[in-house]
Image (cartoon, rainbow, N blue to C red):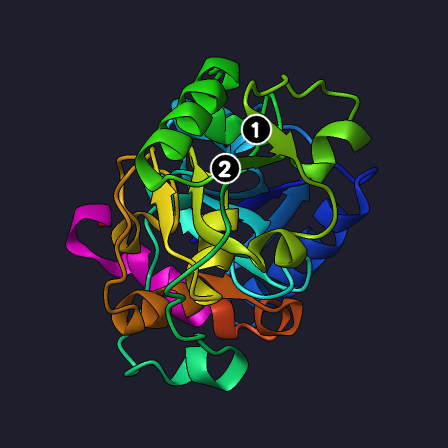
């Protein structure tokens, strides 16, 4: 089998991950090539950074392993590896280890009973997870519904990457804007409401109930889906699976990651 890794050498994170993936694949005896363009990929299986490029490769008939930021803990220290999709729409290979991997690196805080406000979490305009959707009207509706149904003031936290990338986040009528870190914003929240942001994962791990509106959210299985609802389900099985959706660079480099995620290609439907 041959695997082509597509990476922009000018993007340091893509380059370092491509090199690590190539080394890990070679440890499994897999013929590997790194190229910078998704055009003319001479292999059935491709690896790339991000779904923007992954979608091009999938439309060209490739089985695509998508590398992206992780979901738990330091998102820059972990890398998600999912097949043929982004976040909750990707296929992940998640061994059943009874939660050992999660407990080795992370911990769940108890569910929170109170809180002073409903936190609306913003996302980066133009992000591939939004599929072109303008969230301005959704934010406004969510803030109004949260204030009405929870009986609490709404606060809006714009995604910090939006400003860095020069993308304007719309104003949210009726919601006070909050700055600072996500942990600081969650500190007094009774509930977090988001379309599909990974902030829902952070909230659930921190014990803050979450509402997610899109199945692409990695917290979909443990979140409510209607503003006004507030659920506190068992999180153990969800957390155990999520810990297998992301890998350290060392695990990618030494082949441990491919040993698990490569099992997808050995399934009957991929034969």
Q: Which residue is drawn at 28% across and 50% down?
A: 230
Asked if residue 265 is among those painted magenta in the image, a careful observer would answer yes
**Residue 81 visible to an observer of this rendering:** no
In the rendered image, residue 231, in percent from the top left (x then y), is placed at: 26, 55
Q: Quadrant of residue 146?
A: top left
In the rendered image, residue 204, in percent from the top left (x then y), is placed at: 41, 60
Q: Give the range drawn in magenta.
A: 258-270
Q: Which residue lies furthest to the front in this view?
A: 151
Identify residue for label 2: 153
Q: Which residue is drawn at 28% across and 83% down?
A: 98
Mark 1 in CB contact with mark 2 (< 8 angstroms): yes
Magenta span: predominant SS is helix
Asked if residue 248 is among those painted magenta in the image, a careful observer would answer no
**Residue 67 visible to an observer of this rendering:** yes
Q: Against 203, is 28 above or below?
A: below
Identify residue for label 1: 175
Q: Against 141, is 64 above or below?
A: below
In the rendered image, residue 247, in percent from the top left (x then y), is placed at: 54, 66
Residues under labels 1 and 2: Cα distance? 7 Å
Q: In which quarter of the image is residue 36?
A: top right
Q: SS of the residue at dot 1? A: strand
Label 1 Cα crowd, 10 Å radius (few <14 / some 14-19 / many 20+)? many
Nearer-the-camera pick, 53 or 123: 123
Q: Which residue is drawn at 46% across and 14% down?
A: 137
């Amino acid at each position: 089998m041959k695997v082509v890794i597509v990476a922009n050498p000018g993007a340091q994170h893509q380059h370092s991950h491509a090199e690590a993936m190539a080394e890990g694949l070679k440890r499994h005896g897999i013929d590997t090539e790194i190229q910078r363009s998704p055009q003319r990929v001479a292999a059935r299986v491709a690896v790339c950074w991000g779904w923007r490029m992954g979608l091009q490769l999938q439309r060209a008939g490739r089985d695509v392993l998508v590398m992206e930021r992780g979901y738990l803990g330091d998102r820059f220290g972990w890398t998600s590896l999912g097949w043929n999709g982004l976040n909750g729409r990707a296929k992940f290979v998640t061994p059943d280890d009874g939660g050992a991997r999660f407990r080795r690196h992370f911990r769940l805080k108890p569910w929170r009973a109170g809180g002073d406000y409903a936190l609306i979490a913003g996302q980066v305009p133009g992000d591939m997870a939004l599929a072109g959707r303008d969230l301005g009207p959704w934010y406004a509706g969510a803030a109004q519904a949260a204030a009405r149904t929870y009986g609490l003031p709404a606060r809006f936290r714009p995604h910090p990457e939006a400003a860095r990338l020069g993308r304007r986040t719309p104003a949210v009528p009726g919601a006070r804007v909050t700055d600072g870190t996500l942990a600081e914003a969650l500190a007094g929240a009774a509930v977090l409401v988001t379309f599909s942001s990974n902030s829902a994962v952070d909230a659930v791990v921190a014990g803050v109930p979450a509402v997610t509106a899109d199945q692409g959210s990695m917290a979909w299985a443990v979140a409510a889906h209607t503003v006004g609802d507030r659920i506190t389900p068992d999180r153990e099985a969800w957390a155990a699976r999520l810990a297998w959706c992301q890998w350290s660079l060392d695990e990618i480099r030494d082949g441990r990651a491919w040993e698990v995620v490569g099992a997808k290609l050995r399934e009957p439907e991929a034969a």
